[in-house]
Image (cartoon, grey):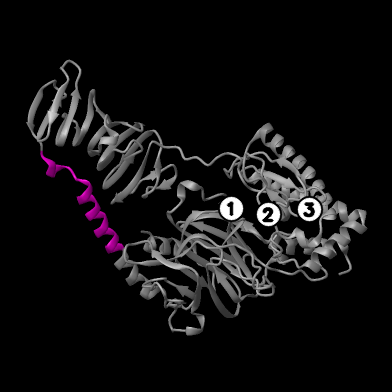
Amino acid sequence: MSDPMQEIEELLSEWDAGTLSDDGVRRLRELVRSDENSRIHFARLQTFHAALRSEAGRGESLVVPASGDSKLARNEGGDGSNKGSSSKGSGISLDLPAAARDDRGLSGSNDRSSRTLAFFIGAIAAGLMVFAFLRSPVEDEVAGGNGSPHPAMATGSAQRSDAEPSSPGVAMVTQVAGVDAMVDGRELSAGQALAPGDFEIDEGLVQIEFFCGATVVLEGPAKLELVTTDLARLLRGKLRAQVPPAALGFTVEANETRVVDLGTEFGVVVSDEGMGVEVFEGEVEVQHPGDVARLLEEGEAVTHGRDGVTALSDARPGEFVDIQSFHEKVSARLLDRYHRWQEWSESFRRDPRLIAYYDFNNFGRWDRRLRCRTEPVDRSLDGAVVGAVPAEGRWAGKTSLEFKHPGDRIRVSIPGEYRSLTFSAWVRIDSLDRWYNSLFLTDDYNEGEPHWQILDTGQLYFSVRKIPNEKQKAVNKRKVLSPVFWDPSLSGKWLHLATTYDVDRCVVRHYLDGELLHEQAIPKDQVATKTRFGPSTIGNWTRPYRPDRDFAIRNLNGSIDEFAIFSDVLSAAEIQEIYLHGKP
């Protein structure tokens, strides 16, 4: 390659992708050491990446090794210990600033200041990286000796928050049936934390478990204000509360009445006529303005009308849905959705655009062959399961495969050449504890081969390798990162992820739960018009040209329930259809 600048860019592209060999690392160091212009160009590229990641990321501690150190490693905790770093040197730490995750960014002077700071930090980081790059030995630059670089080396910025993860809330949703509602911009679902404030449903049932231990079943239409972990205010509708001894004192306010639990199960209703309290087990204290505190015992009820009339009556437990009945309703609804998905899947697998389709259904504990379900049947596309074990999928009775150990994976081999592609998967992420968390990775990342994964920042990452010719300048713009879509509050929740690679329009699109998450154009000379797969891995990464004992650890910490690859760009409507038919 005659142009050293172009050669540097291409070598850095391989470095960033995790495919740069030891010979490539030596060649890159030789170029940077031997020529001042090459060093400047190298630093500029790293400055640019550092600034971008500093602005888009969550804030990181970047650790640059001293001359004897072996790696660039992230600072894993407040105790100053550097996980994965060499014991040869102490290193230099740069704390990168946290930045907004919102796509809108900042405005005005704040925007200019943040960009200036980002590029300033990027320049410092790049300079230190050049120094570390020139001083450290080749075999120690690639983490673990497997050729997979630390993200800080590849982009100029590590991506880990120094703050302990937190999730605001006083309660959480544990069961949902027949509810169409959004909370904090997300469709209401089990596992979602609820912060203090108004919670409203027009129909259906929601089970809410307060962090004090009390459980409430809310029937729509209803509006409930969550105040604290042991206090809620019913504004309209009705609820049934089950309060174990550990949650003694849980209180529900309705109109001007306070219902204080004394170890019981009770119901509260608010309507245009007034409010009522009914006790199904144990006892509660009812405090109403202008009236003495009243103790209600099992089987008793009281109403306070808006006209000021108070009346005693018998409790009617059948008028309020209890937890057991609710669970039975939810189970029946989920079973119905599972059966409807099975019917839809039978027609879905006949789509002629499908390259491979794995539904993970009815997978036995010791089955090691994952059937490709495309029709007509092609057994050569069946996957080989290594380590991963069956787990419950999106519905009771449906299986998924769980990836927990570093070696867990599904091996596939997909022949042929294609153009545009679409990837689709139902994924449950338990945590993102790898730098890269694999969804689908080809073994080598050669020309036209795609890599689909999730960064530990909670961003979807997609790329297809395009090697420029001698007349083209290698600009690293083929990697497409989505905004941050995952945080610990989504741990254990089933998500539908999809990415399209449009060769004709030179566009990559990321989707989350049927909605467009991110769209990015790619320069035409960076688009691989022929795509291919060959030996590949779902849920991990295999690098067969490395020794068997030495492999990159990119296993997904979670489960995959359904996985499909298409030889075409699916429309937004088609991706929405996959989500709607498959959502639990």
* Other-residue count near label 1 (Cα within 10 Å), few / some / many at <14 / 14–19 / ≥20: many
Q: Residue furthest top?
A: 290
Q: Residue at x 85, y 55 (%)?
A: 134
- Label 1 residue SS: loop
Q: Nearer the viewer, residue 135 or 432?
A: 135
If the image is split into quadrants, where does the C terminus sit? bottom left
Say whether residue 355 is visible.
Answer: no
Q: On the picture, is 460 further left or further right than 281?
A: right
Q: Which mark is residue 456?
A: 1
Instruction: Please give the name of the residue rendered at 61% of the width and 74% of the height, measured from the top-left corner.
Output: 419
Question: How far apart are the two marked residues, 3 and 1, measured between alpha carbons?
Answer: 23 Å
Per the image, label 2 sits on a secondary structure element best described as helix
Q: Which residue is mark 2?
A: 151
When asked about the image quadrant of residue 143, the answer is bottom right
Distance (Cα) linking label 2 and label 1: 10 Å
Marks 2 and 1 in Cβ contact (< 8 Å): yes
Q: Residue 534 location, x and y as percent? A: 61, 78
Distance CA(mark 2)–CA(mark 3): 15 Å
**Amino acid type, residue under disc 2 in the picture:** Pro
Closer to the camera in the image, 266 or 186: 266
Between disc 2 and disc 3, whose residue precedes?
3
Q: Amino acid at mark 3?
A: Leu
Q: Are marks 2 and 3 in contact (CB under 8 Å)?
A: no
- Secondary structure mostly seen in magenta is helix
Front residue (pair 58, 467): 58
Location of mark 3 (residue): 45
Residue 64: x %, y % from top left: 75, 47
Residue 68, above or below 349:
above
Label 1 is placed on what type of residue? Asp
Q: Marks 2 and 3: which is nearer the front?
A: 2
